[in-house]
Image (tube, helix red, strand yellow):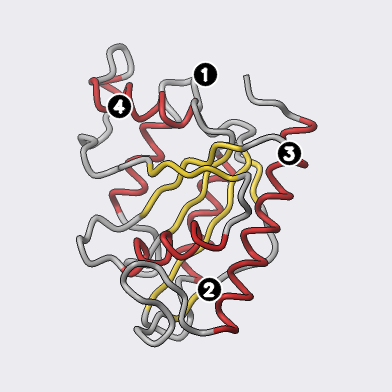
Amino acid sequence: MPTYQVGYFVGSLSSKSINRILSKALIRVAPDDLEFTEIPIGNLPLYSPDYDGHFPPEAVAFKAAIAASDAVLFVTPEYNRSIPGALKNAIDWASRPGGENSFDHIPAAVIGASKGPIGTALAQQSLRAVLGYCNARQMTAPEAYIQYSPELFAPDGTITAERTEVFLTNFMAEFREHIERVLTVLPRQ
């Protein structure tokens, strides 16, 4: 059984991010043949086409981290009914310059948590549109809109609600199957 390298993005730059806690929870319940590496987004300068001829070292390292991944997982909050600016900036870097889109055909999944009752539904819709344009091979089901509360997750990512643990375990098992299906048809270079 192969091991798949999953690069994951936490859309929030906050040191107290509930989505960082969610990412820890997802890693805890993921199948054993998935290995995770966070791909940080906070050190990237704002993207401009002026960089297309010569990427700064941070952007080169960022694209290399995606290239080293078999799949990507986005764990994002919702800001103003969309994705955080830092995450959009990172996607812009990854998709440039023209003809060097890091997300082309990569297996991808989207999930997020918020304290509100719609649990990042609109951010995920926005992110899915951007990833669709970038030609990422998205897992479309199950959808996962997590309404965060401290009763569900410990700060270290331990899931304290059995129903939530079962749901997230199933989500990650489905993501693993999605990765295998996509890579069987479209192997990463």
Q: Amino acid at mark 3?
A: Val
In the image, residue 189 lies at what x, y percent? Answer: 62, 19
Q: Gap between marks 3 and 4, in whole Å?
A: 26 Å
- The first of marks 4 and 1 along the sequence is 4
* Residue 13 position in % (x across, y down): 24, 55
Q: Position of residue 182 (x, y in %)?
A: 73, 38
Mark in the foreground, 1 or 3: 3
Residues packed near mark 3 inside 10 Å, few (<14), some (14 to 19) or many (20 plus): many
Sooner in the amino-acid sequence: mark 2 or mark 4: 4
Pick the front one: 116 or 159: 159
> Mark 1 vs mark 3: which is more N-terminal?
1
**Residue located beneath label 4 in the image:** 59
**CA neighbours of label 4 inside 10 A, class few (<14), some (14 to 19), many (20+):** many
Q: Are marks 1 and 2 in contact (CB under 8 Å)?
A: no
Residue at x-position 24% and y-position 36%: 44
Task: From the image, tell me which residue sits under label 1.
Answer: 99
First in residue order: circle 3 vs circle 2: 2
Label placed on residue 182:
3
Q: Residue furthest top?
A: 53
Work out how far the residue at label 3 is from the one at label 2, CA to CA, in angstroms: 23 Å
Name the element at disc 1.
Answer: loop
181 sits left or right of 139 in the view: right
What whole-number distance in Å separates the C-alpha atoms at marks 1 and 2? 33 Å
Left/right placement of residue 140 relative to residue 49 reads right
The three-letter amino acid code for the residue at tag 4 is Ala
> Which residue is pictured at 40% across the width and 77% down the height?
153
Q: Which residue is mark 2?
A: 145
